[in-house]
Image (spheres, helix red, strand yellow):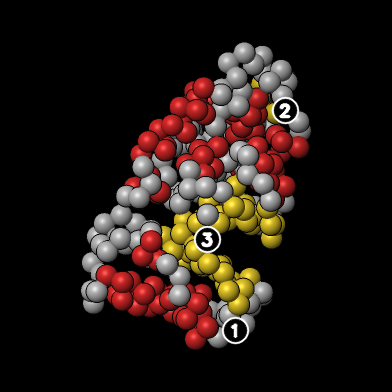
Amino acid sequence: MRFMASCLFGLEKPVCDDIAALGYGKTEVMDGHVLFDAPESAIAECNVNFRYAERLFIVLGSFRVASFTELFDGTASLPWEKYITKNAAFPVKGHCVRSKLFSVPDCQRIIKKAVVERLKSKYRVSYFEETAEKYQVVFFILKDTAYLMLDTTGDALHKRGYRKSSVIAPIKETLAAGIIDIAHVYPDSQLYDPFCGSGTLLIEGAMHAMRIAPGLRRRFSAEKWHWLPASVWQQERQRAFDLIRRDSTFRAWGSDIDPQAVELALHNAKQA
């Protein structure tokens, strides 16, 4: 299976390291995106364990596009019926970068129509209710190459679940994790953040040091897909739980000029 992990600019290398740590080899890096090959089980493994990526996509195909006709034909040639069921919802979103096709709404309409026509011919129906599970179709057109994908993640991976509220201008959890990676935090490290805000750096430091999988306690879109067994997710969460470094001597201290921020950091730490 071909996958694409999206990330904040500058975090491509940590994402590649995450992919390598999970045992998957060669990667192809673009700005804010990393392509790699892995088995179907990687959908659960990557979503649960990715520390720096924002989303994980299944890449159904990629092709050169210079016109809407080419976009329609290329999209319609892909095996959407392999994943999307007859009654499933399949909204379309995406973006274009440095390409001849730059109108996102037009690309959305063309791709939606192409997927509908493909599924019509396969399911022998003329209308799709789209009332069952959701398959978010995503397109990324970069330098006239279109990537057509399905989003396995749902809410972005930086939403770990422990930070329900935050101070003004909070740092994303994935960016905080990247800073922790650069700082070389280990299971026996000591970390001090003098401007801790809602505690994101401290919490990400603790999770990194103790090898706590960021997605251990949250849910993902692909968990509702009928063709991906629930046992895959259960096994991966159990494996990640067993890998937690309970012998870690990591300690972290934080301070902030705002007492409410300190209270919020303590609350978020307890949630985590």
Sequence-wise first label, 1 or 3: 3
Tell me which residue sits at (69%, 60%) in the image. Answer: 30
Secondary structure under tag 1 reads: loop
Mark 3 Cα shell of 10 Å, populated few (<14), some (14-19), many (≥20) = many
Q: Position of residue 267 (x, y in %)?
A: 49, 26
Q: Which mark is residue 59?
A: 3
Q: Nearer the viewer, residue 216 or 4?
A: 4
Q: Amino acid at mark 3?
A: Val
Secondary-structure class at tag 3: strand
Q: Amino acid at mark 2?
A: Val
Can residue 126 be seen from the camera position used here? Answer: yes
What residue did someone put label 1 on?
Answer: 66
- 60, 220: nearer the viewer: 60
Note whether residue 260 is visible. no
Which amino acid does the dot numbered 1 rest on?
Ala
Q: Residue 162, position in %: x, y?
A: 48, 33
The residue that disc 2 covers is 185
Distance of label 1 from label 2 (alpha carbons): 46 Å
Residue 64: % across, % down: 60, 77
Asked which secondary structure carries label 2, the reply is loop
